[in-house]
């Protein structure tokens, strides 16, 4: 077997591919990729989905103009053009990235499945055939995550059943789509396809969508979703079959009902991509859920083996993975001054209808952490820009410590939530009492950011202080 | 003459009307208002304009869907409905506010023109007839600002000539409108009316629109404006006449050209509303431009006379006026612990096409203040959300100190600029080196806030440090 030795082998070309140029200039580096070069974010996740998300939002805007004294008609939705606009942009980036790794001095790209066969030793089953053995002084596990497919839905895969990996590349837009799952992937695609005119049904095991988020947010979002989509909660798919020579599916639910649909999107969850990696063989510990265990510096249980991103981090967020990549690639070459993964509160967006932004602790997490909690919810409808938008559903909720007034977390649900939550995140980072922080800066009137300002000012004054307003 | 004595007399019912309830509960307060109750922001400024701005943006969104693989047609623009939606919402708030001031215990409202006739003594010529003399222990001058009308355009006023006070209440939407001026008011209404289908011409004395802003911003905005509107720069209206029995106007420009138009919006500037106030009589100094002079606590040159808002502050921003109002109303009742006007950098939005947000110093101001300046401009087109939007014009520019890396100011021009600039403002407030600040928090991928993150990271590292990326 051909054997190659490298200074560093990185498994995974998502955030793992973001090698810092200067500091790695003298190192021999191999990147191994089993799937599409560039990882989930670029190819099947954040970036292409947002291009569809904006298109769907645009279509929705056209549908909702009447309330403003305008009339408009959405006369055409050209799926092929929509899809090709996205992938004619994305695919060349992926291909260009792969080409660069192949051709750049000091780096090699291996396209195939990596499996540990010893300490810092990997056998890569190449897609082109054959196996190569890679040994390295240091290895980075950055394999990301992959969608799960429940057994009951397996019969659909490859025909009418899809995951995020294939759903954006459909040949034609179906009239009806069933999305199984109620998490971020499910509600983003529900927005996308319903926006493009597809009748969307969601089948969710729990009673709420986005149930990992703050309970009030999850409840509020679910209530709005029911107005827009056919949301079946508390139910599960127990059987599935392809019908009509591959033009549709019948799904059997656990309550006995049968759903007829054209396309099924399986969005039941994602798991860390450690299958087949045989981490054990390298002495790398993996937890019960399949996540690679690591410390705050990105070190796994095996000397010289590091990890970053979805494969070790349940947030499964690209910006978290990127931050971890910066730390790991620094630590690789500066063992004498190890950096740590950031501990600042994580902000995140969910790009559905409505959009969501979250930061820091949920109310439940804040209570579990021992805080006496106060909250305040500010409606978009009560700030000037919300009036302008005729927004009757948007809101911002802040969760604070009753004694100190410090903001522990919160969320925004509505127009531009993913930007607005960044501002709320600043309040969390500041650790100042909410009122003081909000009063300590200007909020341009009448921008939508006033929902964040007013959410903070609406909190009760910290205990034992004079009223804070 | 009837004479009434009050603890506090406030002249102006805009930000001046935001009396803090609890601390003023035992005081006898009069509010004097010469115009519409509630001031410019509520009646003729920020709030109604943004309702039109969003409507116009919505219409523009409909027009621009083709690039996303959609087709749509804007089939109707119902001006009366658009206008009435706004004022059926705004007018009752103004009326309700006036009613409250008349009826609430401890406060009185005088509707008429106030003129100082002595120290803390005002004669108010009431709209209902008669004059009342008000004396007070303390007086707050909060008269705001008013649009100027150049002599050459005076003949149009009352018929086809408008200011921001009347333009939003037009009986019908004209086919063509000429806007004289190139400041914030001009470009916001240019967006509004062009968005609603009106052919807009701008006549500007200088060579650029928004010339008070950072020069690069002003240049970039002007270039985009020329694609959207007929922008006549370096020219001035020297004559104007109403034609067609009040259905249009002819404007003569200083280059001899004549513009035929239906409606003229005069947006040549605003001046502090001190005309007729006879501030001298009260011992209140007014500067050459008409602004009431004051110190950082809001105290004028006359003992017991305070000021706040547009009448004393050239920024003429509502959120600045509100902040000053909080300070002045605190200081009125707590002379032993005077607060100061905020010194944090001012953020501001301009709600045109594209939207603009600014914060802190312009490049020129930064140089004048003695900084060696570095800048970086980040295009929307180079972040994922910008791709999604097919945005080819948006950008964020940051202005920093070359030695320290501290951010001194900057701007955003494009989608959601007024929110995004709040984030940039946080970088300014932090006084941290730009790279450290940007790396010290999460930026949710792929939200549009990445333009701010990347603008900061794109700055060169502060001198004498290792590269900051």
Image: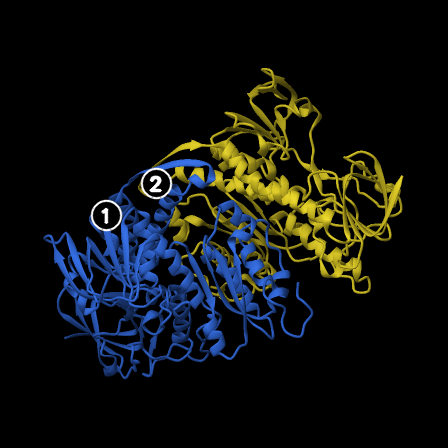
Chain colours: A yellow, B blue
Looking at the picture, tell me which residue is in the foreground, B163 or A296: B163
| Disc 2 residue crowd, few under 14, some 14–19, many 20+, Cα 10 Å | few
Looking at the picture, tell me which residue is in the foreground, B139 or B27: B139
Q: Left of A306 or right of it: where is B42?
A: left
Q: Where residue A67 is drawn, which disc sits there? A: 2
Tell me where residue B317 sits by quadrant: bottom left
**Residue that numbered label 1 is attached to:** B173
Residue B272 percent coordinates (x, y): 29, 72
Residue B390 percent coordinates (x, y): 49, 46
A305 lies above or below A172: below
Is residue A369 visible in the rendered image? The answer is no
Looking at the picture, tell me which residue is in the foreground, B452 or B467: B467
B436 lies above or below A308: below
Return the chain for callout 1. Answer: B
Q: Is mark 1 on a helix, strand or loop?
A: loop
Return the chain for callout 2. Answer: A
Residue B84 percent coordinates (x, y): 26, 46
């Amino acid at each position: 077997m051909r054997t190659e030795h490298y200074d560093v082998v990185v498994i995974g070309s998502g955030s793992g591919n973001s090698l810092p140029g200067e500091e790695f200039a003298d190192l021999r580096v191999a990147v191994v990729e089993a799937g599409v070069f560039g990882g989930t974010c670029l190819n099947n996740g954040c970036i292409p989905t947002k291009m569809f998300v904006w298109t769907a939002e645009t279509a929705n805007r056209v549908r909702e103009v009447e309330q403003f004294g305008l009339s408009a008609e959405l006369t055409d939705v050209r799926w092929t053009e929509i899809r090709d606009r996205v992938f004619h942009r994305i695919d060349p980036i992926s291909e260009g990235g792969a080409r660069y790794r192949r051709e750049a001095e000091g780096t090699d790209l291996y396209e195939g499945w990596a499996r540990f066969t010893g300490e810092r030793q990997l056998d890569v089953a190449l897609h082109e055939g054959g196996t190569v053995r890679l040994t390295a002084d240091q290895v980075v596990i950055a394999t990301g995550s992959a969608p799960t497919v429940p057994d009951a839905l397996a019969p659909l895969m490859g025909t009418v059943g899809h995951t995020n990996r294939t759903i954006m590349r459909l040949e034609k837009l179906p009239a009806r789509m069933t999305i199984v799952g109620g998490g971020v992937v499910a509600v983003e695609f529900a927005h996308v396809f319903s926006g493009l005119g597809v009748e969307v049904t969601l089948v969710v095991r729990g009673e709420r969508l986005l149930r990992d988020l703050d309970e009030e947010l999850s409840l509020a979002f679910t209530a709005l979703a029911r107005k827009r989509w056919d949301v079946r909660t508390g139910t599960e798919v127990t059987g599935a079959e392809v019908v009509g020579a591959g033009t549709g599916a019948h799904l059997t639910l656990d309550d006995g009902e049968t759903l007829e649909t054209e396309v099924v999107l399986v969005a039941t969850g994602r798991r860390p991509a450690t299958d087949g990696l045989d981490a054990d063989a390298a002495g790398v510990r993996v937890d019960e859920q399949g996540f690679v265990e690591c410390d705050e510096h990105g070190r796994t249980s095996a000397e010289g083996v590091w990890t970053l991103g979805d494969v070790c981090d349940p947030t499964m967020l690209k910006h978290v993975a990127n931050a971890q990549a910066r730390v790991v690639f620094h630590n690789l070459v500066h063992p004498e001054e190890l950096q740590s993964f950031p501990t600042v509160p994580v902000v995140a967006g969910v790009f559905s209808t409505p959009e969501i932004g979250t930061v820091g602790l949920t109310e439940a997490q804040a209570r579990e952490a021992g805080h006496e909690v106060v909250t305040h919810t500010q409606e978009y409808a009560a700030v000037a820009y919300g009036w302008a938008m005729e927004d009757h559903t948007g809101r911002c909720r802040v969760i604070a410590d009753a004694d100190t007034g410090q903001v522990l977390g919160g969320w925004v649900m509505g127009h531009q939530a993913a930007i607005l939550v960044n501002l709320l995140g600043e309040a969390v980072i500041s650790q100042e009492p909410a009122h003081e922080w909000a009063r300590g800066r200007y909020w341009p009137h009448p921008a939508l950011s006033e929902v964040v300002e007013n959410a903070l000012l609406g909190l009760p004054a910290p205990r034992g202080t004079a009223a804070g307003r």
